[in-house]
Image (cartoon, coloured by chain):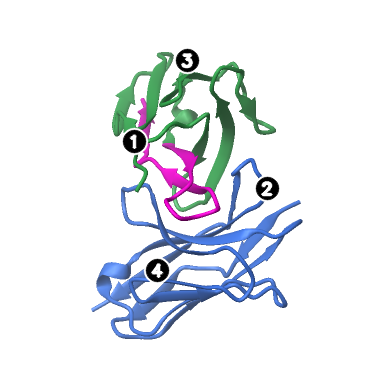
Chain colours: A green, B blue
Amino acid sequence: GAVVSQHPSRVICKSGTSVKIECRSLDFQATTMFWYRQFPKQSLMLMATSNEGSKATYEQGVEKDKFLINHASLTLSTLTVTSAHPEDSSFYICSAPARPLGSSYNEQFFGPGTRLTVL
Amino acid sequence: GNSVTQMEGPVTLSEEAFLTINCTYTATGYPSLFWYVQYPGEGLQLLLKATKADDKGSNKGFEATYRKETTSFHLEKGSVQVSDSAVYFCALLTGANSKLTFGKGITLSVRP
């Protein structure tokens, strides 16, 4: 099946620094990737849709200058949390759609997530 | 717009008990429906799916049937195990943009 990786899996940083999270599709190409944020014991909140070769589409209420997204290639999207603060601490998950063999529908494949802790 | 409603949690069961987790949805068009599972400290894994009405998705002893008439996709398992302890998310997908709409998730704890 399609595999999505994220790096790093955990990161701890000081307030005011920027943190970059990578999302890679390992065995397929993804022109679109999705970034989610998950607070403890809550659902996934879609933050933005990352589009290869064009600007990301942000969901309402998500600060695009705070959460910079770059879809550099067909297998890599990055999320940079700029000037991070403790309230940005969260679990960030990416996903990419792919069509399993024999299926006529796309399916979302999720990365393992990145735990960000801002001190 | 699209939405997914899951029953309130958490749910605590004894091993070998019967499990039902309710999920209802509203959507434009004809959505595909999914159950995802998230084990502690991990990302989401697809548990099962159904792409059209009356389809039954099944995996690892879990089942869910796509009921268009009741707009539901309830998750069931006949005999839960301690290893099933996780958070379960119901989700739907419509259209070509592959954007998923998630329910709030429910935490299942299975005690020995």
The answer to if A35 sits in the magenta stretch is no
Task: Establish whether labels 3 and 1 are both on one chain.
Answer: yes
Disc 2 marks which residue?
B95
Q: Amino acid at mark 3?
A: Ser
State the separation of the CA atoms marked 4 and 1: 32 Å
Left or right: A66, with A40 as reference point: right
Front residue (pair B102, A10)? B102
Q: Nearer the viewer, mark 3 or mark 1?
A: 1
What is the three-letter code of the residue carrying label 1?
A: Asp
- The quadrant of the picture occupied by the C terminus of chain A is top left
B105 or B56: nearer the eye? B56
Residue type at numbered disc 4: Leu
Per the model, the C-alpha gap separating discs 4 and 2 is 31 Å
Question: Do the numbered discs 4 and 1 sit on residues whose CB atoms are within 8 Å?
Answer: no
Q: CA distance from mark 3 to mark 1?
A: 33 Å
Q: Residues within 10 Å of mark 2 (few under 14, many from 20)?
A: few
Q: The residue under label 2 is which amino acid type? A: Gly
Q: Residue at x 39, y 19 (%)?
A: A19
User: What's the chain of the residue with tag 4?
Assistant: B
Image quadrant of residue B77? bottom left
SS at mark 1? loop
Q: Identify the disc placed on residue B108.
A: 4
Q: Which residue is mark 1?
A: A27
- Residue A17 point in image, percent of width and height: 40, 14
**A56 horizontally vs B17: left or right:** right
Decide which of tag 3 and tag 1 comes sooner along the chain.
1
User: Is mark 3 in CB contact (under 8 Å) with mark 1?
Assistant: no
Give the left or right position of residue A9, taking residue B69 as reference.
left
- Highlighted range, magenta: A91-119
Q: Secondary structure at mark 4?
A: strand
- When asked about the image quadrant of residue B104, the answer is bottom right
